[in-house]
Image (cartoon, rainbow, N blue to C red):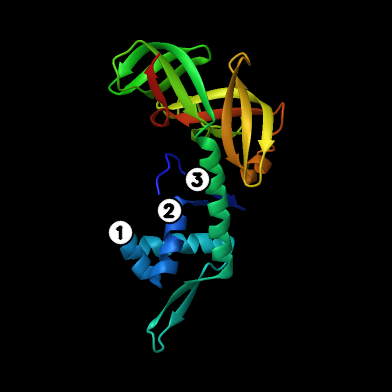
Amino acid sequence: MDAGFEAHLRVGDATVDERDVALLSAVDREGSLSAAADALGRSYSRAHKRLGALEDELGALVERERGGASGGGSRLTDDARALLARFARVRAAFADTAGTEVAVLTGEVRERDGELATVATDVGDVRALLFEDADDVQVAVRADAVTLHDPDDAPAADASSARNRFAGTVAGVDRRESVALVDVAIGDGDVTLPVLVTVDSLERLTLEPGREVVATFKATATRATPH
């Protein structure tokens, strides 16, 4: 189920991701947590621990039956099925939008470290994957690859040399049913970075025009190509 991005859903203090959805779906399909872990190639102890952490935040997700003629097993609760349906809607919205919303920055390669290149652009240096031998390149940044942070909670600039970090201001918000497309003005405000977030993140960060934010994205999720 690889669409070139990984959707996630924030529910209260819990963040539900693709691995969590795969685990719940496997429990539904296989009929037990143990069989689900085996089917996914995961250890039972880790699957059990993760399920417990989710249930601590979200309530019961799996009903366990012991013994009986069928030997017991597990099945999803109605809340778990509702969670899977909600996640599917978010993922569909991401897939519909992420493929078309891309920021393209042009620049010149300043240095390379294997497949990682540092590109000088109008908004500053951007680190990106570059597989060709080129000096003048364009860097494509997908909307789903960017994470927005409150400036007070953003990772430090030197936290990871392979993570790009830009301060910006929200220029516009296109809110949809499950996701929102947020335009963030970076640099001197002449460049707009589209960012795809869930509605939960939109509300949690109170994203609205004029809001100062920090945008980060991994170099490994960013591709540079000859211009």
Q: Which residue is mark 1?
A: 41
Q: Going from the N terminus, do you reach mark 2 or mark 3 first? A: 3
**Residue 10 appearing in the image:** yes
The residue shown at (51%, 25%) is 165
The quadrant in which residue 218 appears is top left
- In the depicted structure, whether residue 45 falls above or below residue 92: below
Tell me: 15 left or right of 171: left
Pick the residue in front: 162 or 221. Answer: 221
Q: Amino acid at mark 1?
A: Gly
Q: Nearer the viewer, mark 3 or mark 1?
A: 3
Q: Residue 120, image x and y in percent? A: 44, 12
Amino acid on which disc 2 is placed: Arg
The crowding category of the residue bearing disc 1, from other C-alpha atoms within 10 Å (few below 14, some 14 to 19, many at least 20), is few
Q: Is residue 29 left or right of residue 134?
A: right
Q: Quadrant of residue 32?
A: bottom left
Q: Secondary structure at mark 1?
A: loop
Q: Secondary structure at mark 2?
A: helix
Instruction: Tell which of 106 and 73 is nearer to you.
Output: 106
Up/down of 80 relative to 184, above or below: below
**Residue, x 42% and y 53% (percent of image)?**
19
**In 3D space, how far apart are the residues under numbered discs 3 and 1 (Cα atoms)?**
21 Å
Residue where numbered disc 2 is placed: 19
Counting from the top left corner in percent of width and height, residue 4 is at 42, 39
Of pointers 1 and 2, the one earlier in the residue sequence: 2
Q: Is residue 103 above or below residue 47?
A: above
The residue that disc 3 covers is 7
